[in-house]
Image (spheres, helix red, strand yellow):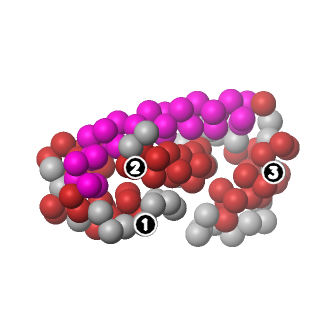
Amino acid sequence: MSRVIKILALAVTLATFVFAAPSQTVTAQQNPCKADLERLCGDVQPGQGRIQACLKEHKDELSAECKAFIEVKAEEVRERLEHLAEVCKGDAERLCTNVEEGEGRIFRCLFLHKDSLSPECKKAISQ
């Protein structure tokens, strides 16, 4: 597995909960985790990954519907990250050679160099 794919794969865990967490654009019908979030994490102040951490901490207590929703979102994120890793591999190798792997640092590097990215990578990141 290439360095970029490994690095982006590590971001899946974080991204899974980011994309699975309810947002202002997702209705209760579209997100079956809303009730679980209110029940398990209602007292958690949003921001800096606290909601995601709470969900992860209570993963065994989530409803079957919420777990299934997160699984679907996780697969969507995995597919997107694999596409991103494939499209941006050359850019990462060119622009981020001195960046330590892990914790989304390569993705941050690419984002910080967005003006220098290939058109294909730029498009993939903006989607």
Residue furthest right as drawn: 61
In the image, residue 73 lies in the stretch drawn in magenta? yes
Q: Are marks 2 and 3 in contact (CB under 8 Å)?
A: no
Q: Which residues are magenta?
A: 65-93
User: As shown in the figure, which amino acid type bears the numbered disc 2?
Assistant: Arg
Q: Position of residue 121 (x, y in %)?
A: 23, 47
Other-residue count near label 1 (Cα within 10 Å), few / some / many at <14 / 14–19 / ≥20: few
Q: Earlier in the sequence, mark 2 or mark 3?
A: 2
Residue tagged by mark 3? 58
Residue tagged by mark 1? 100
Residue 23 visible in the displayed image: no
Q: Nearer the viewer, residue 122 or 90?
A: 90
Q: Tag 3, which secondary structure?
A: loop
Predominant SS of the magenta segment: helix
User: Residue at horizontal 15%, vertical 61%?
Assistant: 116
As measured in the structure, the alpha-carbon distance from the residue carrying label 2 to the one carrying label 3 is: 32 Å
Q: Earlier in the sequence, mark 2 or mark 1?
A: 2
Residue 60 visible in the displayed image: yes
Q: Earlier in the sequence, mark 3 or mark 1?
A: 3
Other-residue count near label 3 (Cα within 10 Å), few / some / many at <14 / 14–19 / ≥20: some
User: As shown in the figure, which amino acid type bears the numbered disc 1?
Assistant: Glu
Between tags 3 and 1, which lies in front?
1
Residue tagged by mark 2? 3
In the image, residue 25 lies in the stretch drawn in magenta? no
Q: Tag 2, which secondary structure?
A: helix
Q: Are marks 2 and 1 in contact (CB under 8 Å)?
A: no
User: As shown in the figure, which amino acid type bears the numbered disc 3?
Assistant: His
User: Residue at horizontal 70%, vertical 59%?
Assistant: 53
